[in-house]
Image (cartoon, rainbow, N blue to C red):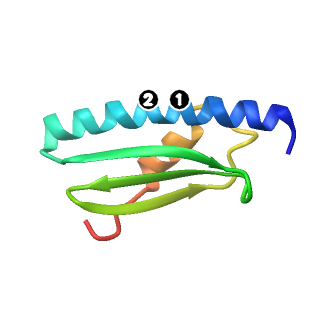
Amino acid sequence: MNQQTTAKALKVVEYTNKKLSAWYVNAKEEYGINGFGVSRFDAVRNSIVIDFSENGHTSTFVVEDWLDEAIEYSFDVWMEFGECVEC
């Protein structure tokens, strides 16, 4: 992995964490969902991982094809397809 990949991963994680925070503030206000999410870079799998919890149930969503996409891609994919399995 090169420095460019690491730098982009850090930007994606920072952006995604900000969006997740705002998402769950809105989810609480609009739908009564108690939740939070945090993203991280998995260097071994070269993927963006989003761990999230909704009303006490946790789940993990992995975005593998993020590198050639725009910075908002990982959050947008999670928002569209991420499901809390036990919710």
Q: Position of residue 3 (x, y in %)?
A: 84, 33
Q: Relative to 19, is 45 on the left or the right?
A: right
User: Which SS class for mark 1?
Assistant: helix
Residue ID at (32%, 36%) = 23
The residue under the point 22% across, 40% down is: 27
In which quadrant of the rendered view does residue 57 lie? bottom left
Identified by mark 1, the residue type is Tyr
Q: Are marks 2 and 1 in contact (CB under 8 Å)?
A: yes
Q: Can see residue 70?
A: no
Distance (Cα) linking label 2 and label 1: 5 Å
Residue at position x 65%, y 33% in the image:
10
Q: Which residue is mark 1?
A: 15
Residue bearing the label numbered 2:
18
Residue 71: percent from left, percent from top: 62, 31
- The part of the image, by quadrant, that contains residue 58 is bottom left
Q: Is residue 40 above or below residue 26?
A: below
Residue reaching furthest bottom? 86
Residue type for callout 2: Lys
Whether residue 42 can be seen here? yes
Identify which residue, 81 or 32, lies in the foreground. 32
Say which quadrant the N terminus sits in. Answer: top right
Number of on-image labels: 2
